[in-house]
Image (cartoon, grey):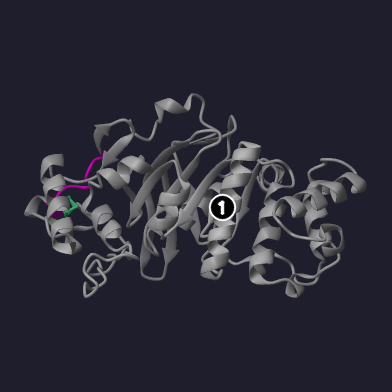
Amino acid sequence: MAYAYEACGEPILSVRNLEVSLKTSVGELKATRGISFDICPGETFAIVGESGCGKSISSMALMGLLPRIATARADRCVFDGQEILNLSRRKLSNIRGNTLSMIFQDPMTSLNPVYTIGDQLTEVFLRHGKGNRKQARERAVFLLERVGIKNAAERLGAYPHQLSGGLRQRVVIAMAMMCRPKLIIADEPTTALDVTVQMRTLALLAELQREFGLAIILITHDLGVVASLSDRVAVMYAGQIVETAPTRQLFADPTHPYTQGLIQCIPSYEPPNPDAELHTIPGMVPSLIGKQRGCAFRNRCSLAVDACGEGDEIALRELGEGHAYRCLQPHDALVANWRLLQGESA
Ligand code: SF4
């Protein structure tokens, strides 16, 4: 199967049929349905989709950070040889911030405003028994320098509000690296930053990954970010992976109509037609409350036929080399649709 990535060898994270449900006053909301993927050591795996498609809640389930109203179950959720879903709080805290770290969207909410940067960086190192205070401080200074913060030793005494947004996000990245993690989940790591700072932060993440051999799950709604940083990508829609492929393959042969729509929506900085309008995907993500039937994208899909609304769900179809899509239409018809869309936007 495409999600059991053969080039991987032994995956650092292997997830099969992850289901996250939330109890709401109007019924059970199925936030994710049957999510499966493998993460190879040292690779960047992007999860992309619009708000509410289930990207962030999947990562929260992996980190054991779901709200009380949510429950998660899976056939398998193995990180670094250990089943991690629904682990006890104590066992999870041994992993979280240690071999498995997370970078959140907004650095201000990741950092405690009443503690110095130094206290927060060293605390995670000491809590996981990685060394003494002197070693913790040395590691903090090393990492602050490595993420490009000048006068690192002096900065340890600064409070979060004394740093710019870009510097705060660099501190958060340094904090995620304190215990030499094997996998970092970066949830929209640049969304709260200015555009110029975004590019520098992404370049920094890529550099650190190469240098320290990290695996990264990059959660984003931005396909431009996916193109520049990831090795493989999963496109999510309405709680399901609707297409997965190596990143180059996805951009060369976008197959699911939703993926095609997303790629068409990437703004061009050199438009062949300066009067061309920005593209959108008309319609909205459907309600995820109650039992879902057929393809969740059918109300927005120009290729939908009656059969798209029948049955429990559409199965993933394999195209080979790690590429699979969840649609009833044959590949040829979807390629023809993509050519048509490209012709329209030329
Ligand atoms: S299954 Fe039908 S509605 Fe869903 S993406 Fe394919 S053609 Fe469109």
Can you see residue 15?
no
**Residue at position x 60%, y 32% in the image:** 80
Quadrant including the C terminus: bottom left
Under tag 1, what secondary structure? helix
**Which residue is rendered at x = 78% and y = 44% of the image?**
128
Closest to the observer: 23 or 65? 65
Question: Seen in the image, is 209 located left or right of residue 346?
Answer: right
Residue 68 percent across, percent down from the top left: 55, 61
Residue beneath the point at 13% across and 58% down: 343
Residue highlighted by disc 1: 203
Residue 315 among magenta residues: yes
Q: Where is residue 162 in the image (x, y as percent from the top left)?
A: 76, 74
Name of the residue lying farthest toward the left: 306
Specify whether residue 17 is painted magenta. no
Residue 272: quadrant of the picture: bottom left
The location of residue 255, given as percent across then percent down, is 22, 46
Residue 73 x, y percent position in the rendering: 46, 45
Residue 112 shows in this picture: yes
Residue in the foreground of this view, choosing between 136 and 155: 155
What residue do we see at 34% from left, 33% from top? 322
Relative placement, left or right, of 40 versus 313 is right
Span highlighted in magenta in the image: 308-316
Relative to 282, is 312 above or below?
above
Mark 1 beta carbon near ligand 1 (under 8 Å): no
- Residue 248 vs residue 119: left or right? left
Majority secondary structure in the magenta region: loop
Task: Look at label 1 and name its amino acid.
Answer: Ala
Disc 1 crowd, CA 10 A, few/some/many (<14, 14-19, 20+): some
